[in-house]
Image (cartoon, rainbow, N blue to C red):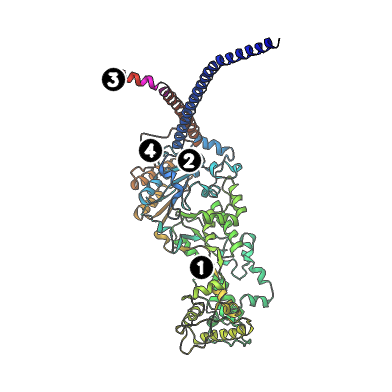
Amino acid sequence: MKKNARLLKILKFKECFLFIIEIIPVSIMRFKRLKHRFLDKVHRLKKKILTWSFVIFFVIIIFILMKIQTYQQLCHKFIDDLSAIDVVYTWVNGSDDRFDQSISKYKTNYDITRYDDKNELRFSLRSLEKYAPWVRHVYIVTNGQIPHWLDLSYSKISLITHKELTRHMEILPTFSSSAIETFIHRIPNLSKRFLYLNDDIFLNAELFPEDLYTNSDGVKVYNAWTVPDCATDCPWVYIGDGTCDQHCNIEECQFDGNDCALNDETEENDDRMFDMPEPVFYEVPKINDTTNGSPIRKLKSIKRKTDVLNKGISFKDYIKKSNFTRTFNFTDEKELKDYVEKFNSKQKTKIRTRNINLNVEKNSPESTSDIFMHSLVYTNKLLNRIYGFKSRYVLAHVGFLLDKDIIEEMEKKFSDEILKTAHNRFRSPEDIQFAFLYYNFLMSETINKTVSEIFDEFDSDNSGTLSDREIRTFLTRIYPIPLDWAAVKYAEQVLNNCSKVFFSDSKTQIEYSTLAYERYEDSKMPVISKDLIENCSIFKEAMLSHFAQRNRYKFLVNSKREMHSNFMMLKSNVTDVIISLDKFRRNPKKFNCINDNLDSNMKEENEMVRNLLEDFYISFFPHQSKFELPDHYRNKFLYMEDFEHWKTQKYILLIICYIISAILIGIFTSYLCAYKAKCARKCIELL
């Protein structure tokens, strides 16, 4: 039994062994088949991944090429903004039916002639191309309209809508140029400094960047006439001049700059208001002499004379800077009053004479109904509150070179007023005049230098001490020329006394080396270090009072405005228009402005004026510019909304076509890879 059981086990083991031997080759074969299938699938998947990667990469490249149209756009942000100057125009076509429907929703009795387009922009661009070819790029800011003649494919021009620039969509649509001017500086890729032009301004002589800005002088300012009077017989030179003018003591004139409130005080306060230091420093008091008043007060009183009209200073400053005490008896009140009245009369006569001589519209300074004039007065009041009362000038009709950084600083200071103007859908008497505010902000902003910085300016040899020569330079800038020897001796005495006090109180004695050539032979000056000046109150105050306050921005008021600009008010009188246009022909200038003030009731005359204006423009600019389409072409779309919709559809269609093309190329490539052996064999057979 045991043998049989053992034999059975051996037989079963043999059968299992034979079964295993038989099944192993079959399993190996099946494993190889599965392996081949798996590898084949992986290979196919790899091909598909590579193919679709190629397709996606191809589509991305095409999309990037569609977005980047030119090499100039790709490198635009790398161009030096300091040297590049762009031009910004604001434009509207009031003859368009859609514009008429839009404006009628908010105002039915608007003046249609104000928004009428007479092709001024077309000829202004021609003049820009002819006389300012250095301009990098031109931006036209519109409410969405497109000039039918404009070549949108030209690389140097871009059309920007209000929607792209404003941060407050609720203010749109806006029909106020004052509101539009508050956000033109937000144009993407706009140069740091840009030239802002109205479409009614054209060039008629060579314009260079140096006519607008130089590194040494800063921005050029072209003034015209003074800001309109705040009331009848109340020019701004009367306001805040220290003399009470009762007829100007009204809210419109800011209550005479508080002059009448000061006049109602005691006689002692009146005398204090006109307290005048000696204009010339001939006898210098000693440092311990207090009978004649503070010596530093007399130091501060010695300043360089300035022209009253050019600087726009008040009567109070004029009195302080004049030789009043030599001509009049200060104790004679009647004589002082006569002098004040005489001064005011002369000032008013000069201002009126200057206004008449300027080539501006005759009713501009006197018109009380013109919103533009009222907004100028409003802006001037705003400037008075911030920078003090003075007679300011309206800018000439030229292009305005604006700096984005300065505009941002101005927006911080006048944010509420700018926001209020931006929310006015139509022009308002309480709008700010943007360019007028900008240039006066630029000319009024100041910075204060420290004593250390002023000391370094006079320390020309960087020795850390002031030599006798450098002290003399300092004295010539605070005293009249010729320099009185008494002033030199007084300064020497002040510095010696300060040095004794300073070095006796100083715990740590600092050694300063004063070179031999820094001292005159008979000099008694001490070692004048920066620490000594900072601890010498009299000298320190003299430095700060004369040299601390500086202009924050560089600017130069150009006195030759008449050489650079022409202005004409276009009216419905045909004869006057012909005469004015002939004056422009006779004397062309860099900037020429033809403003529009047509009577909407005189349609026949207005049509004739339009034809005369067209003929005038063609006589100077007969040839088309690169900004224009050829004569037999015109834009299919006259609104950016329609144009953008068409461009979107075009891009979508192009992308679909590119994707289909890429798929077909991918399929063909994968087919070629799959059957490359057969293809090679057929090619060999054919050969």
Dominant secondary structure, magenta: helix
Q: Are marks 2 and 4 in contact (CB under 8 Å)?
A: no
Label 1 or label 4, whichever comes before in sequence order: 1
Q: Are marks 2 and 3 in contact (CB under 8 Å)?
A: no
What's the distance in space between the residues labelled 1 and 3, CA to CA?
Answer: 96 Å
In the rendered structure, find residue 629 and report the number of the disc placed on it: 4
In the rendered structure, find residue 687 and report the number of the disc placed on it: 3
Residue 73, quarter of picture: top left
Q: Of the residues shown, which amino acid type is indicated by label 4? A: Leu
What's the distance in space between the residues labelled 2 and 4, CA to CA?
Answer: 18 Å
Residue 665, quarter of picture: top left
| Relative to 308, 619 lies left or right | left
Magenta-tinted stretch? 671-679
What's the distance in space between the residues labelled 2 and 1, CA to CA?
Answer: 41 Å
The reply to whether the magenta stretch includes residue 520 is no
634 or 94, which is in the foreground?
634
Q: Of the residues shown, which amino acid type is indicated by label 1? A: Lys
Picture coordinates of residue 681, whole percent (x, y):
34, 19
Q: Nearer the viewer, mark 1 or mark 4?
A: 4
The reply to whether the magenta stretch includes residue 672 is yes
Q: Nearer the viewer, mark 1 or mark 3?
A: 3
Residue occupying the point 35% across, 52% down: 585
